[in-house]
Image: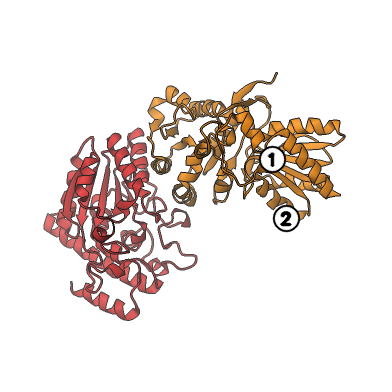
């Protein structure tokens, strides 16, 4: 498939996923729209282009693995999994309800196919991704591991423990992504803890770093392709994104980190997504 | 003269024996490879050993990841770090996902000695047993620790093993049956039942011998597995003796004694006296001095027995 066609196809899926996110959240009455919308394109590229995986066989030993370290963005992951065929689309409307397999943050033990591990307490996913990657290497399985982190999340010390270990162990079957939307809960990341410059920090820890516009399919595809070629070093993609991307009143708005839109707001959001 | 051997040696030997049986076993260490005796496994199976540096949270997460591809990881560090520092990682990455990760928490208890409070782990029974899916085992000697380690690797799901630094009396043999979850009656008695774990089992046996001379018949039960706890043996003891003493080298709050009492009171109104650390941090000293200073000797158990018998009426 030519790159233009591929981009068109992925953009179409991403639009659908964004609509699903809004619909899920308004039905649930709570949840995290901002970071799900910013990271949406990255997850769509992974699930519908880059990763080798089989929705009919979620336990396939040689599958690529995706760890959503920023677990609160799970509405995007759930929508991707459903659209990919892991479970019925209708199940998305059960998000956060009692007895649902779609827990507020990803749960491994509630039976939802496609969830590698429970996440939600920030900072833990990269260590887990390292462990998976090391285990695959030990067993000589060529699968790759992808770990999506938030840019507020990288304030957690454990991320840097894992970053150090990934470099030390030359974990090159691992690709991290930082969803650099510039915002966290209490304000912008610059206001709160000045984590910039982010790429330089990862470089200093021994990683190959790639900076991209994280909401442009072509750039995302190119970055993942480059990551696959890098040997003896892990790669991190610093993806500059817009928090709340696609919904006019949510874009770059701190307050849309963790609250669901009302029915009226959802109507406006869906209209935005229709015309974007 | 009773043989003395550190339970951490039993752990190290257990790891090797397990590693020989099962090639999926891997070991991770947070810069305390010799102290925890993970060194024995490292020597034998270097390709399956991962040093994680002074980064315990990362060690737990990495172990979680390894277990997701079918490995059976054992994390090794001091109990204070294994149960305290990384409590959220153990809670979320390991227990909530119910991953097949084992944690060896070395240097349990104040008998760690001169290093002092920051290194003396006296809260791990409480911290670990409150987590769903976690199993908690406190073996009484080096031989039992070896068996517990092997069995931990053979059951599915998270397991926390508590063991110690200093050589302590060997009181079981390689033929003593050991099954995770099944307590062992070391000594029968009809006046009082003393439940103990770890180093306190030996102290309890010595206390029982002394009590015998005073005409008190004290039973001693080695309740090595705090979770899942052997309820039947506790009910039986409460019913048959009507008086319980618990003994742990650990804080009393929510610990071993509490675990026993929580079970006993489900069916019986039985007086319980607990021997343990009364809400103090540890301190530097020699193991022997500290055991005395913190009230964890056979004499403290004897006092507790006498007290509980008075309450029994």
Q: How far apart are marks 1 and 2 (CA)?
A: 20 Å
Describe the element under mark 2 as helix, strand or loop: helix
Residue B251 position within the rendered picture, expressed as x and y whole percent measured from the top left: 61, 44
Q: Which of marks 1 and 2 is in front?
A: 1
Q: In this view, does B119 lie to the left or right of A274?
A: right
Specify whether disc 1 shares its chain with disc 2.
yes
Residue at image position (15%, 50%) is A222
What color scheme is it?
Answer: by chain
Spot occupied by residue B195 in the image (x, y as percentages of width and height): 72, 40
Comes first in the chain, label 1 or label 2: 1
Disc assigned to residue A164: none
Percent of width and height locating residue B222: 69, 36
Q: Which of A161 and A171 is in front in this view?
A: A161
- Please name the residue that numbered disc 2 is placed on: B266
Image vertical order of residue A230 relative to residue B287, above or below:
below
Q: In the image as oriented, which residue stretches furthest toward the bottom?
A: A264
Q: Classify residue A166 by image quadrant.
A: top left
- Estimate how packed mark 2 is, as few (under 14), some (14 to 19) or many (20 or more) residues with alpha carbons within 10 Å: few
The N terminus of chain B lies in which quarter of the figure? top right
Left or right? Give the position of A176 relative to B7: left
> What chain letter is assigned to the residue under label 2?
B
Provide residue B229's location: percent of width, then percent of height.
65, 45
Q: The red chain is which one?
A: A
For this rendering, which residue is in front, B28 or A101? B28
Pointer 1 residue: B247
Residue B289 seen from this side: yes
For label 1, the crowd category at 10 Å Cα-Cα, with few meaning under 14, some 14 to 19 and many 20 or more, is: many
């Amino acid at each position: 498939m030519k790159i233009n066609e591929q981009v068109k196809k992925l953009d179409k899926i991403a639009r659908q996923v964004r609509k699903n996110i809004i619909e899920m959240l308004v039905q649930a009455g709570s949840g995290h729209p901002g970071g799900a919308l910013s990271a949406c394109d990255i997850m769509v590229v992974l699930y519908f282009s880059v990763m080798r995986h089989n929705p009919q066989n979620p336990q396939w030993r040689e599958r690529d693995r995706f760890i959503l370290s920023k677990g609160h963005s799970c509405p995007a992951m759930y929508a991707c999994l459903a659209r990919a065929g892991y479970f019925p689309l209708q199940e998305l409307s059960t998000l956060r309800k009692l007895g649902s397999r779609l827990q507020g943050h990803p749960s491994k033990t509630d039976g939802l196919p496609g969830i590698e591990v429970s996440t939600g307490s920030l900072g833990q996913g990269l260590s887990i991704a390292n462990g998976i990657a090391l285990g695959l290497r030990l067993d000589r399985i060529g699968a790759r591991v992808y770990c999506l982190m938030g840019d507020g999340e990288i304030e957690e010390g454990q991320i840097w423990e894992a970053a150090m270990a990934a470099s030390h162990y030359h974990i090159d079957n691992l690709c991290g992504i930082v969803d650099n939307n510039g915002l966290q809960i209490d304000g912008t990341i610059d206001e709160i803890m000045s984590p910039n410059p982010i790429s330089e920090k990862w470089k200093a820890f021994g990683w190959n770093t790639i900076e991209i516009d994280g909401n442009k399919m072509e750039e995302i595809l190119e970055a993942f392709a480059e990551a696959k070629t890098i040997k003896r070093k892990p790669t991190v993609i610093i993806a500059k994104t817009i928090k709340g991307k696609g919904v006019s009143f949510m874009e770059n708005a701190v307050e849309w980190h963790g609250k669901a839109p009302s029915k009226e707001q959802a109507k406006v959001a869906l209209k935005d997504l229709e015309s974007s | 003269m009773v043989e003395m051997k550190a339970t951490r040696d039993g752990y190290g030997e257990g790891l090797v024996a397990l590693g020989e049986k099962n090639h999926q076993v891997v070991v991770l260490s947070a810069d305390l490879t010799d102290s925890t005796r993970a060194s024995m496994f490292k020597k034998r199976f270097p390709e399956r050993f991962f040093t994680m540096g002074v980064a315990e949270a990362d060690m737990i997460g990495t172990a979680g990841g390894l277990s997701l591809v079918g490995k059976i990881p054992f994390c090794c560090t001091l109990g204070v770090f294994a149960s305290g520092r990384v409590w959220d990682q153990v809670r979320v990455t390991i227990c909530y996902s119910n991953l097949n990760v084992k944690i060896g928490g070395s240097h349990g208890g104040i008998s760690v000695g001169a290093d002092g409070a920051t290194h003396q782990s006296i809260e791990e029974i409480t911290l670990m047993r409150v987590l769903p899916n976690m199993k908690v085992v406190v073996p009484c000697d080096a031989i039992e620790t070896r068996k517990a380690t092997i069995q931990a690797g053979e059951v599915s799901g998270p397991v926390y093993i508590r063991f110690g630094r200093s050589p302590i009396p060997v009181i079981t043999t390689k033929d003593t049956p050991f099954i995770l979850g099944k307590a062992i009656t070391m000594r029968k008695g009809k006046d009082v039942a003393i439940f103990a774990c770890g180093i306190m089992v030996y102290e309890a046996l010595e206390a029982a011998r002394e009590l015998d001379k005073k005409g008190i018949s004290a039973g001693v039960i080695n309740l090595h597995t705090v979770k899942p706890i052997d309820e039947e043996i506790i009910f039986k003891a409460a019913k048959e003796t009507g008086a319980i003493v618990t003994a742990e080298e650990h804080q009393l709050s929510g610990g071993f004694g509490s675990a026993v009492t929580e079970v006993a009171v489900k069916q019986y109104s039985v007086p319980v006296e607990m021997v343990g650390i009364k809400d103090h941090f540890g301190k530097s000293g020699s193991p022997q001095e500290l055991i005395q200073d913190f009230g964890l000797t056979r004499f403290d158990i004897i006092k507790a027995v006498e007290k509980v018998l008075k309450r029994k009426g």
